[in-house]
Image (spheres, rainbow, N blue to C red):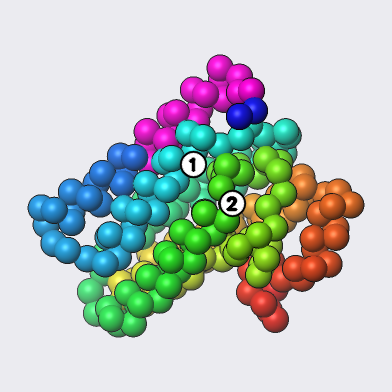
C-alpha cells in the first residue's frame, strides 16, 4: 500500500467513520422500521464507501480550492437536499433510483482505491463502468436523484437535483483537467462520453 501521511490517514478514517454512520442508520431502518430494497441498497453503498475511503490510495495532486467547494456542495446537497414528499410515482421512482444505486455501487467497485470526493489524481481507472462512460459515479448519482424526485415530487427536490447536476458537471470537468495527460487523452479517445452515451 502506498505511504499515506498522517493527515491522509486522519481524513480517510474520518470519512470512513462518517459513511459507516450512514450505513448503520440505513441498517437500523431495515431492522426496526421497515424493510425496503432501496434502504438495503443504500446501506450496502454507504458500507462500500466507508471501506474504500479507509483503504484508498493517497492523491498525487488536487485541484485549487474551488474544487473543494464543488465537492462539498455535492455531498451536502445529496445528504440534506432531498426530502420525502407525497403524491409521486413511488414504484417507478424506486425502480429508477434502484438502477442508479446499482450503477453507483458498480462504479465504486470499478473505482476501487481511487475513490474520492474532491477532484484529484489517484490513478486513472478504465475498467468496469469506466469503460462505458468517463464519470459513471456522477451519472449514477444523478440517475438515483431522478428516481427519488419522481417518487417524491417537490420543488425543493427538483431544485436540489438541478443544483447537483451543476456540481457534478463541474466536478467532472475539473477532474479531467487534473488528470490531463497523454494516457488520459488516449482514454478519452476510447471512451468518448462523460455521463450518458450519445448525449454528453
- Marks 1/2 in contact by CB < 8 Å: the verdict is yes
Measured along the vertical axis of the image, is residue 29 above or below residue 62? Answer: below
SS under mark 2: helix
Q: Quadrant of residue 60?
A: top right
Magenta span: predominant SS is helix
> Would residue 129 be found to the left or right of residue 100 on screen?
right
4 magenta-colored: yes
Residue at horizontal 33 percent and vertical 61 percent from the top = 41
Residue at the extreme right: 182
> Would residue 179 be found to the left or right of residue 197 on screen?
right
In the picture, which quadrant includes the N terminus? top right
Of callouts 1 and 2, the N-terminal one: 1
Residue at horizontal 43 percent and vertical 29 percent from the top = 14
Return the residue nearer the eye: 152 or 26: 26
Residue at horizontal 61 percent and vertical 44 percent from the top = 114
SS under mark 1: helix
**Residue under pointer 2:** 111
Return the residue nearer the eye: 34 or 75: 34
**Residue under pointer 1:** 52
Few, some or many C-alpha atoms within 10 Å of disc 1 (few <14, some 14-19, many ≥20)?
many
Measured along the vertical axis of the image, is residue 60 above or below residue 171? Answer: above
Q: Position of residue 199 (x, y in %)?
A: 68, 79
Residue at the extreme left: 32
Magenta segment: 3-19
Q: Which mark is residue 139?
A: none
Q: Position of residue 48 (x, y in %)?
A: 42, 48
Q: Marks 1/2: CA distance? A: 9 Å
Amino acid at each position: 500500500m502506498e505511504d499515506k501521511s498522517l493527515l491522509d490517514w486522519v481524513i480517510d478514517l474520518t470519512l470512513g467513520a462518517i459513511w459507516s454512520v450512514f450505513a448503520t442508520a440505513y441498517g437500523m431502518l431495515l431492522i426496526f422500521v421497515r424493510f425496503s430494497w432501496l434502504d438495503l441498497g443504500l446501506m450496502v453503498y454507504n458500507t462500500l464507501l466507508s471501506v474504500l475511503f479507509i483503504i484508498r490510495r493517497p492523491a498525487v495532486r488536487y485541484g485549487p480550492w474551488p474544487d473543494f467547494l464543488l465537492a462539498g456542495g455535492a455531498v451536502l446537497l445529496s445528504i440534506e437536499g432531498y426530502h420525502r414528499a407525497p403524491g409521486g410515482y413511488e414504484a417507478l421512482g424506486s425502480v429508477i433510483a434502484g438502477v442508479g444505486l446499482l450503477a453507483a455501487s458498480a462504479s465504486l467497485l470499478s473505482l476501487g482505491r481511487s475513490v474520492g470526493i474532491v477532484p484529484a489524481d489517484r490513478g486513472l481507472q478504465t475498467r468496469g463502468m469506466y469503460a462505458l462512460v468517463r464519470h459513471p459515479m456522477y451519472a449514477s448519482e444523478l440517475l438515483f436523484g431522478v428516481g427519488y424526485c419522481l417518487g417524491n415530487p417537490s420543488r425543493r427536490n427538483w431544485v436540489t437535483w438541478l443544483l447537483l447536476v451543476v456540481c457534478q458537471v463541474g466536478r467532472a470537468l475539473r477532474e479531467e483537467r487534473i488528470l490531463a495527460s497523454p494516457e488520459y487523452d488516449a482514454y478519452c479517445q476510447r471512451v468518448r462520453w462523460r455521463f450518458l452515451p450519445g448525449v454528453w
